[in-house]
Image (spheres, helix red, strand yellow):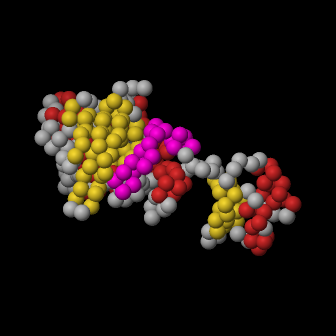
């Protein structure tokens, strides 16, 4: 296993009477693509703000690349790129002018900065729009510009706080491909999201956070092994399936939804037996759909509610 890049020990943070983070301990390895998955208000953004040194924790410690992170540790911020949830761009400036402003904040020599700007604009397919004001950009284009603004100083660590909010599917895919390529080039990435499909697609390891606590941590496949059932079976509701509920209940717990039944197997069984059983009752295979286990199902099992409730 690679060495630790980020080490978080017993971090707590309160705002008035609200506990945003509650004794969070977490380690992220060098060159890892780590996902922090949880609903809105779970503590994801608070943790990102502490990692970048915007606030100090009430208790606990954070180290990045071996150095402590505090509000006063300005030097360490040169090793961090931060993509905030809210766009940090000047609408009246062009895309290139925005990047020049951010580059100057890091005292990057002009020749090196212009080379970086050109390279990054090409990487996210914005080079042809570099002289247009950002107020003319789509939401997805602004998000891409926002990401490369955080990379001009070539940080070791990239923190992405829900970077696809309000983005169309095509731009989201472009952002995913770009982040994956950065990770392959050696960047350590922490990516927060409340979309489990994003975490499953991008991240090699995931922490699930809820009410300021890490409630599950590990590789996706290992996390899904915590589910008490391996897959669910969706059964379309119609007169025939309504009449044969007792057949389904032989195989597990049956939950009634608006337009279908959901069967949660309580033990392993041969699907061939299940399909033979329903065939005897004249039910069609097309009424049945297998659902593989998901992080959404794991979150539901751990908390008793859905990720986006």
Which residue, as the protein is rendered here, is positioned at the far right?
A: 280
Q: Is residue 116 rendered to the left or right of residue 211?
A: left
Let me know if residue 232 appears in the view: yes
**Quarter that holds the C terminus:** bottom left
Q: Looking at the image, which residue is at 78% across and 58% down? A: 285
Residue 219 x/y as whole percent: 49, 39
Q: Was residue 4 drawn as part of the magenta stretch in this picture? A: no
Which residue, as the protein is rendered here, is positioned at the far bottom?
A: 239
Q: Is residue 196 rendered to the left or right of residue 26?
A: right
Residue 185 x/y as whole percent: 38, 29
Residue 105 x/y as whole percent: 14, 40
Closer-to-camera residue (266/207): 266
Does residue 127 lie above or below 213 as drawn?
Answer: above
Q: Which residues are magenta?
A: 204-225
Which residue, as the protein is rendered here, is positioned at the far top?
A: 2
Q: Is residue 193 rendered to the left or right of residue 225?
A: left
Q: Looking at the image, which residue is at 27% across and 61% down? A: 18
């Amino acid at each position: 296993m690679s060495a630790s890049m980020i080490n978080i020990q017993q971090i707590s943070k309160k705002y008035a009477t609200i506990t945003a983070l509650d004794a969070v301990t977490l380690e992220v390895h060098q060159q890892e693509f780590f996902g922090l998955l949880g609903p809105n208000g779970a503590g994801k953004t608070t943790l990102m703000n502490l990692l970048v040194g915007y606030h100090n924790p009430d208790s606990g410690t954070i180290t990045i690349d071996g150095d402590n992170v505090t509000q006063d540790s300005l030097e360490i911020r040169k090793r961090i790129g931060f993509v905030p949830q809210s766009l940090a761009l000047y609408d009246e400036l062009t895309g290139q002018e925005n990047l020049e402003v951010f580059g100057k904040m890091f005292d990057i020599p002009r020749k090196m900065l212009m080379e970086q700007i050109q390279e990054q604009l090409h990487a996210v397919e914005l080079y042809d729009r570099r002289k247009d004001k950002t107020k003319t950009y789509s939401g997805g284009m602004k998000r891409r510009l926002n990401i490369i603004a955080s990379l001009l100083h070539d940080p070791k660590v990239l923190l992405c706080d829900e970077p696809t909010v309000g983005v169309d599917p095509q731009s989201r895919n472009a952002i995913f491909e770009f982040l994956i390529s950065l990770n392959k080039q050696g960047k350590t990435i922490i990516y927060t999201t409340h979309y489990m499909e994003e975490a499953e697609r991008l991240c090699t390891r995931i922490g699930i956070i809820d009410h300021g606590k890490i409630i599950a941590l590990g590789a996706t496949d290992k996390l899904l092994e915590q589910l008490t059932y391996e897959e669910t079976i969706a059964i379309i509701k119609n007169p025939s399936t309504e009449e044969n509920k007792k057949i389904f209940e032989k195989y597990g717990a049956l939950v009634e939804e608006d337009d279908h039944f959901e069967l949660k197997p309580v033990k392993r069984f041969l699907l061939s037996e299940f399909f033979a059983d329903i065939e005897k009752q004249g039910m069609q295979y097309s009424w049945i759909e297998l659902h593989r286990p998901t992080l959404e199902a794991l979150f539901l099992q751990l908390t008793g509610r859905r990720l986006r409730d």
